[in-house]
Image (tube, rainbow, N blue to C red):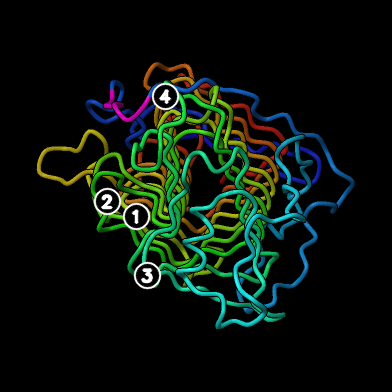
Amino acid sequence: MRTMVLTLGALTLAACSESPGPTADFSAPPGDAARRDGAGPPADRGAVGEVAILDAGKGREASKPPDNLPAAGNPNPEATCAVPAGAGPEDSATPRTVVGSGTPASCTGAAFIAAVAKGGVITFNCGPAPTTIKLAGTAKIVNDTGPKIVIDGKGLITLSGDGKHRILYMNTCDQAQKWTTSHCQNQDHPQLTLQNLTFIEANSKSETQYDGGGAVWVRGGRLKLVNTRFFNNVCADTGPDLGGAAVRVFSQYNNLPVYVVSSTFGGRADLGGVCSNGGGVSSIGVSWTIINSLFSHNKAIGNGGNPAKAGTPGGGSGGAIYNDGNTMTLSLCGTRIEHNDAKTHGSAIFFVSNNHTGDIKIDRCVITSNTGGSWYPTYPQISNHPDTPIVVTSSTIK
């Protein structure tokens, strides 16, 4: 490979182009060009990547968190992207349910699970200090309790799976959570926003029907993450197409993107997520718009890719991000992806559009020091089909 370095403003863009002679394995492994995709309808690209420049420094200034963990969002200088309309925090001033009565002891896992079942806006009154709520099971969204469901921790609430459970589940196509339309795979509700929260020690390894999604699993409606942190979450160690130690998503309404704004996945060597694929997030047929966020120290530990090579259990792709499906867009702005690791493909990003109609947009980002994997036809650390359009501006990829 030959490395090109382009200076763009205050940042440097490093790209790779092929040179004659022996190279690393940048070709798609057998079978990966026509892959399995049976977990939902294809997604269109939706309204993705519509971001503008903020005043210098605005949007990356984060107050010091009340604990000793990394703050939500990307603290580095590139985090200067504006937040598009609809991607910011939701109003939580008039909650349907307030969990707790002013003390940490009153903020129980059972109270949180009950609040989620009631839907609407949920806030917390656990006292002035940071509070961790351990769950003895998974909180499940009931699909007729919206249309907007907002869970706002005000920067003080940590939800813990206690190393045993997924924390939050929403599925418009799960009859147990109520069918509310005749087209569950494409409906505009519930519209779930998770803001000013921390998700830790979730574990979905015991899940089989709805696997992956260590902390959060979503199908249908809309999902938005704002000022939210994910630490030490896990899902199954192996498997060709499951993933998302923090979050796994399917079937967003009208193919609109999942918004991720000023959020952190990992952030420190001892806090990363671990799953077969997608140590941070994973999806099938879904677009993402990720703004001013940080993915670091996450791991995709499966082995054998998708479809799984003979004699392997499959997986190991997308150290930070795993996207599979058809027409979809991954849009990154003001985001840093570093120190993630993959065993098979895509140490930073794995992006496969089965019908070769998806695209990637990278603006004012830093993607660096991610390790492992192979099949990097366009840029280092990003696995994709060679014909996937990738537009990179004012970014560092090296």
Gap between marks 1 and 2, in whole Å?
7 Å
Q: Which quarter of the figure has residue 20?
A: top left
In the rendered view, tell whether residue 251 sits above or below residue 11: above
Spot occupied by residue 51 in the image (x, y as percentages of width and height):
75, 33
Pick the front one: 157 or 287: 157
Q: Amino acid at mark 1?
A: Cys
Magenta span covers which residues? 35-40
Is the C-beta separation of discs 4 and 2 under 8 Å? no
Q: Which residue is mark 3?
A: 136
Q: Is residue 58 left or right of residue 320?
A: right
- Assess whether residue 97 is covered by the magenta stretch: no
Residue at the location (81% across, 40% down)? 9
Q: Is residue 350 above or below residue 41?
A: below
Name the residue carrying label 2. 302
Name the element at disc 2: loop
> Which of the marked residues, 4 or 2, is nearer the chain's N terminus?
2
Marks 3/2: CA–CA distance: 28 Å
Q: Are marks 1 and 2 in contact (CB under 8 Å)?
A: yes
Dot 3 alpha-carbon crowd within 10 angstroms: few under 14, some 14 to 19, many 20 or more: some
In the picture as drawn, the residue positioned furthest to the right comes out as 55
The percent coordinates of residue 282 (x first, y second) are 43, 43
Question: Label 4, label 3: how many angstroms apart (C-alpha)?
Answer: 38 Å
**Looking at numbered disc 4 in the image, what kind of residue is underneath it?**
Ser
Q: Residue at x 68, y 67 (%)?
A: 155
Residue in view at x 51 percent, y 39 percent:
144
* The N terminus lies in quadrant: top left
Q: Position of residue 325 (x, y in %)?
A: 40, 26
Q: Main secondary structure of the magenta part?
A: loop
* Above or below for 277 versus 179: below
- Check disc 3 and give the amino acid type: Ala
Residue bearing mark 1: 275
> Mark 1 or mark 3, which is nearer to you?
3
